[in-house]
Image: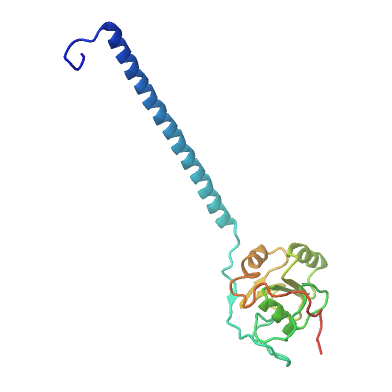
Amino acid sequence: MTDGGKQASPGRQKLLDLRQQQARRERRQRLMIWGAAASSVLLVVGVVATALILDQRNTPSLGAVQTFTPEAGHTESPVTYEQSPPAGGEHAPVWLNCGSYDAPVTNENAVHSMEHGAVWITYSPDLPAAQVETLRESVPDTYMVLSPYEGLPSPVVASAWGKQLHLSGADDARLTEFVREFRQGKQTPEPGALCTGGVDGGPTS
């Protein structure tokens, strides 16, 4: 029927029917497109959420990290530190050049490097050579100090300013996570300060 109450001609009615069919097809197509888009978004969200959950499950726990609140400041005198190896405190005016050392380094210089954001990895002098090499290969090139240390409480100890973790060896998965978390970390008093141009190794005059 037309708006005037008269029956539409067969040709006009056919045109109206075709338009209605076309409108229904377009609505169905829009619904299909929206549905496909929504499904894609949900799929992406699901994949990302799953990846995050798996990543969290596979990330080694740093729950065993010890936290300290060391005092800073320069001194020319030897320092008796509360932790061994130290995890911060008063230190020499000159920092230790970051890098790998085959012999013990001076605590007071290494602590100064930690104040600048370095992580100091110490290992027992009797640690197998293969594990020492693993440590050398696994640590970053900058803001890291690696050296042997007498009398450690565990085969390897990772220390940053105010943070310390005892490790079972060079292959302890927590080492990488410790370095990622605390090297130049928010606990660092002077992040980004020099880790070169200081001194190498042993005591300074």
Decide if residue 96 is on the left or right side of residue 86.
right
* Quarter of image, res 85: bottom right
Q: Residue at 67% across / 75% down in the picture?
A: 159
Q: Residue at 44% across / 31% down in the picture?
A: 33
The spot of residue 71 in percent (x, y) is: 61, 86
Decide if residue 136 is on the left or right side of residue 180.
right
Q: Quadrant of the N terminus?
A: top left
Furthest-bottom residue in view?
Answer: 77
Furthest-left residue in view?
Answer: 5
Residue nearest the viewer, comparing 17 with 142: 17
The spot of residue 96 in percent (x, y) is: 76, 79
Furthest-front residue in view?
Answer: 4
Residue nearest the viewer, comparing 133 with 43: 43
Query: Considering only vertical position in the picture, is 150 above or below 119?
Result: below
Decide if residue 180 is on the left or right side of residue 144.
left
* Quarter of image, res 124: bottom right
The spot of residue 59 in percent (x, y) is: 59, 59
* Quarter of image, res 56: bottom right
